[in-house]
Image: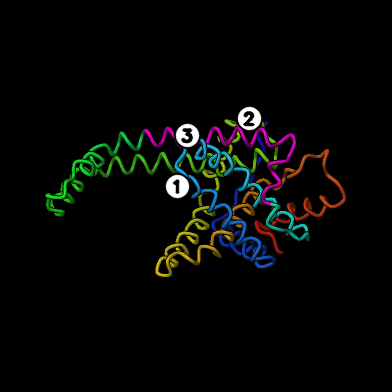
Amino acid sequence: MSADFRTFKASFGMSWFKAGWAVFKTQPLTFMMMYIFIVIVGLFPFVLPNPIVQMLCALAGPFLTVGFYSAALNIQAGKSIMLADILKPFSAKGRRLNIFRLGLYQLGVALLLGVVMSLLFEPVTSALQNHTQEQDIQVVMAEIAAAISLADIAIFIVLQSLAMMAFAYALPLVYFKEQANIFGAMKQSLKVFYYNMAPLSVFGGIAALLMIASTPLSLVPLIFIMPIIYIGFFVSFQAIFANQNPQNEKETGPEDKNVQSAQEETGQTGRFDA
């Protein structure tokens, strides 16, 4: 069963980002350490280029992301968090199997996109592989430029964007709403992006500008920026799906009522005032 969702005006994109900052500044160091941990796991396959390591790290990604979201949820409920909280989804009985399944879907889509990229940019790859030390670099660059097709680039960007949008809200839907139908969650995620394109574009635009601004500083500010983006995006999920209980009703206790009231406030205002 798919969850109902709300639509918001463009201005709420800014509200979600502000809400992300409000939650982040409560325990900034912990959130930064969580983000660094996610980055380290993501880069680990490049240090040990082993297919098994690559697969394990790819499957761990969704667990770490929902662990980060859960930490933000605990801050909203007035609880304190620590770095180890990011690992809690690995032991979440009844929900970890669906996260694992979604991770397999993500891995499959990534492999398909890799095949598509190799087919679309095969001329560019050939030009690079056939390059020799004796060739003039300007001639090689001219060959690469001639091999690049704007249409191929556009096709790949569209496919990559669709994949990103399909999984963006599917992950919290699978974990927090316990949707077992992965395809249904992906479809719902795409619908959310379609009907909330305005506020999500504003949110994404702010994120992009901050990333660009961090470039002269060797992207070091991303340690601060990315956790806020993560939290702000989760706040958007809370607002859009605010009419649904984020936890299984069987698990709801006295402490979870504070979380639920925070979710309801998010749905009314489009942001969480931490």
Classify mark 2: residues with Cα within 10 Å, few (<14), some (14-19) or many (20+): some
Return the x and y of residue 265 as percentages of the image width and height.
73, 56
Question: For the residue marked with disc 3, what is the amino acid?
Answer: Val
Question: Where are the magenta residues, as a range?
Answer: 86-115
Which numbered mark, 3 or 1, is in the foreground of this view? 1
Residue that mark 1 sits on? 46
**Residue with the mark numbered 2:** 181
Secondary structure under tag 2 reads loop
Q: State the mark number for residue 109.
A: 3
Which label lies toward us, 2 or 1?
A: 1
Mark 3 secondary-structure assignment: helix
Structural distance between the alpha carbons of marks 3 and 1:
20 Å
Q: How is the image coloured?
A: rainbow
Q: Position of residue 140 (x, y in %)?
A: 16, 49
Image quarter (top left, top right, bottom left or bottom right) of the C terminus: bottom right
Q: Main secondary structure of the magenta part?
A: helix
Q: In the picture provided, is 228 more to the left or to the right than 116?
A: right
- Determine whether label 3 and label 2 are within 8 Å by CB: no
* Nearest to N terminus: mark 3 or mark 2: 3
